[in-house]
């Protein structure tokens, strides 16, 4: 998962943060044969954003579910953790009013939003629907 920098608004890593992986598929850049142009594989980016706060009890209940999900889906889904206390601008952009809130989005926008502790099976169904 990534964290957002309050200064730049960019996602940054944090030594205290758990390691989370992201994957972007690209073509090899090599021609298929002489005279042909390069072909790039196009894939849709699927992101799971976890809006949480350190003081939130249900958020702590959600964490192990997301950690297990990340282990299985980390190669095809970008997992991001957003602390709503530190990054109110991002929470406002996604209209987060209660936590935990999980937003799953693809290149076209938000696919689904979950408010409250959400079970793995529900999240997996939407990740599959989103093309992960």
Image (cartoon, rainbow, N blue to C red):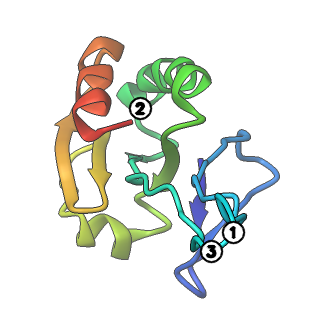
Q: Nearer the viewer, residue 32 or 57?
A: 32
Query: Left or right: where does residue 82 sit relative to residue 6?
Result: left
Q: Residues within 10 Å of mark 2 (few under 14, many from 20)?
A: some
Image quadrant in which you'd find residue 130: top left
| Observer-nearest of 32 and 87 | 32
Select label 3 or label 2 by which is in front.
3
Viewer-closest of 4 and 34: 34
Residue 16 % position (x, y):
77, 47
The label on residue 59 is 2
Image check: 85 left or right of 118?
Answer: right
Q: In percent of the image, x 51 and y 47: which residue is there?
A: 78
Which residue is label 3 attached to? Answer: 35
Residue 70: horizontal and vertical position, in percent? 55, 28
Residue under the image location 50 percent in, 55 percent down: 41
Residue at x-position 46% and y-position 18%: 65
Question: Reading the chain from its start, which is encountered first: label 2 or label 1?
Answer: 1
Is mark 3 in CB contact (under 8 Å) with mark 2? no
121 sits left or right of 67 in the view: left
Kindly report the distance in space between the C-alpha atoms of the residues bearing marks 3 and 2. 55 Å
- Label 1 close to label 3 by CB (< 8 Å): yes
C-alpha separation, residue under disc 1 versus residue under disc 3: 4 Å
Q: Quadrant of the C terminus?
A: top left
Q: What residue is shown with label 1?
A: 34
């Amino acid at each position: 998962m990534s964290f957002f920098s309050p200064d730049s608004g960019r996602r940054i890593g944090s030594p205290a943060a758990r390691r989370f992986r992201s994957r972007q598929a690209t073509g090899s850049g090599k021609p298929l044969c002489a005279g042909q142009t390069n072909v790039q594989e196009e894939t849709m980016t699927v992101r799971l954003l976890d809006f949480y706060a350190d003081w939130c009890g249900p958020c702590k209940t959600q964490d192990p579910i997301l950690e297990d999900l990340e282990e299985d889906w980390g190669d095809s889904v970008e997992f991001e953790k957003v602390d709503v206390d530190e990054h109110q601008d991002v929470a406002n952009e996604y209209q987060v009013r209660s936590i935990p809130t999980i937003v799953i989005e693809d290149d076209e926008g938000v696919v689904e939003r979950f408010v409250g502790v959400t079970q793995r099976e529900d999240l997996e169904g939407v990740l599959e629907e989103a093309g992960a």
